[in-house]
Image (cartoon, rainbow, N blue to C red):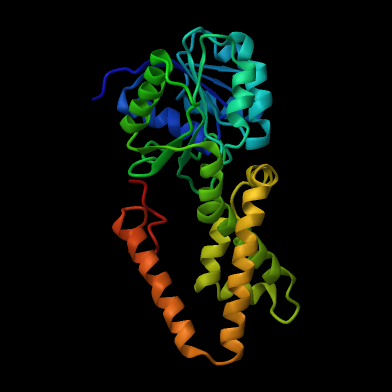
């Protein structure tokens, strides 16, 4: 078992990712005490019932006192406000990070709330399910998944040590860690995560509005590709509203490229260009095989949905 990396960890907002971080850190033995702050009284009651935190608070500033690591795990648009609320309690020398899937401007917002001597290292674990809430987390969520850290452009030894310490923490949770600047992170995630979710929401919405096909038929015959879109479209609506509002520039850039490619695909179908269709489908199949080979997905018939390791 790995030795303790942070004597006390505070998690602000405890849904799927926040609760999974706590469970994974406990399992790995890399944290001592754990405090949680959540504005939702029902969440606080559930966290206390589940018993994976040593202390549960409504106020973020109370939870972060004496914490060596503060993890902001609220929806993206509320990260800045959560950091501001917690800021008065930050311990000198603490590391403050987040788990939001949009990084543009997050570093500046966190730094604005942090007093001197507090190290801000924005982060994003690329892992999750469509489930949400304090009871949705599990300890193996981050195994062989990637966590991206977006440190500031600083070369002082103390800050670099804080980044290395946070990297060791995520590695102990089973994650692979990559360092990346905020702008590039948002472009990468726009194509790998944000656009797929936007497409899924739109396809499921189109099916719901289609008068020629009944809702019962959509549900009954969803064992084909539609089923997989519904899984993505079941994700937390608050979080994804925030993602698209915060990362609109990158999403719109990628959406424009996608629209052009979709028009080209439409022309190929209309004109009966079988070779073009075959070439595209062959290339995309190779991408799928590469994802499986990289350990980011399972080749099992259920696409690994039941796997928690």
Image position of 291 with respect to 279: above or below? above
Q: Residue at image x 59%, y 20%?
A: 111
Q: Residue furthest bottom?
A: 272
Q: Quadrant of the N terminus?
A: top left
x and y, in percent, of residue 153 in the image: 49, 26
x and y, in percent, of residue 276 in the image: 48, 84
Q: Residue at image x 58%, y 74%?
A: 220
Image check: 287 left or right of 131?
Answer: left
Q: Residue at image x 37%, y 47%?
A: 308
Q: Is residue 255 visible?
A: yes
Question: What number of labels is visible?
Answer: 0
- Residue 300, by quadrant, is bottom left
Image position of 191 with respect to 89: above or below? below
Image position of 6 with respect to 254: above or below? above
x and y, in percent, of residue 204 in the image: 64, 65
Along the line of sight, the residue nearer the viewer: 9 or 100: 100
Q: Is residue 300 visible?
A: no
Image check: 285 left or right of 240?
Answer: left
x and y, in percent, of residue 180 in the image: 45, 38
């Amino acid at each position: 078992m790995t030795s303790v990396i942070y004597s006390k960890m505070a998690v602000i907002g405890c849904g799927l990712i926040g609760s999974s971080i706590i469970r994974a850190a406990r399992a790995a033995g890399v944290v001592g005490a754990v405090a949680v702050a959540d504005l939702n009284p029902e969440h606080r009651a559930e966290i206390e019932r589940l018993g994976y935190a040593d202390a549960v608070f409504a106020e973020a500033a109370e939870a972060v006192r004496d914490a060596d690591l503060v993890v902001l795990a609220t929806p993206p648009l509320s990260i800045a406000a959560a950091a501001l609320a917690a800021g008065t309690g930050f311990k000198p020398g603490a590391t403050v990070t987040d788990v939001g899937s949009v990084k543009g401007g997050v570093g500046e917002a966190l730094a604005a709330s942090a007093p001197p001597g507090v190290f801000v290292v924005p982060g994003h674990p690329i892992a999750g399910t469509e489930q949400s809430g304090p009871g949705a987390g599990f300890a193996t969520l981050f195994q062989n998944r990637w966590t991206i850290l977006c440190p500031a452009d600083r070369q002082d030894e103390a800050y670099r040590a804080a980044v290395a310490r946070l990297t060791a923490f995520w590695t102990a949770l089973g994650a692979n860690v990559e360092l990346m600047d905020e702008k590039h992170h948002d472009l990468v995630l726009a194509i790998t995560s944000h656009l797929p979710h936007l497409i899924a929401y739109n396809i499921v919405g189109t099916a719901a509005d289609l008068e020629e096909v009944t809702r019962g038929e959509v549900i009954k015959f969803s064992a084909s590709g539609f089923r997989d879109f519904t899984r993505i479209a079941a994700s937390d609506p608050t979080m994804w509203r925030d993602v698209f509002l915060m990362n609109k520039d990158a999403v719109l850039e990628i959406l424009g490229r996608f629209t052009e490619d979709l028009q080209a695909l439409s022309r190929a179908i209309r004109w009966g260009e079988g070779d073009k269709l075959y070439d595209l489908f062959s290339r995309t199949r190779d991408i799928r095989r590469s994802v499986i080979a990289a350990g980011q997905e399972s080749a099992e018939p259920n696409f690994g949905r039941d796997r928690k390791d």
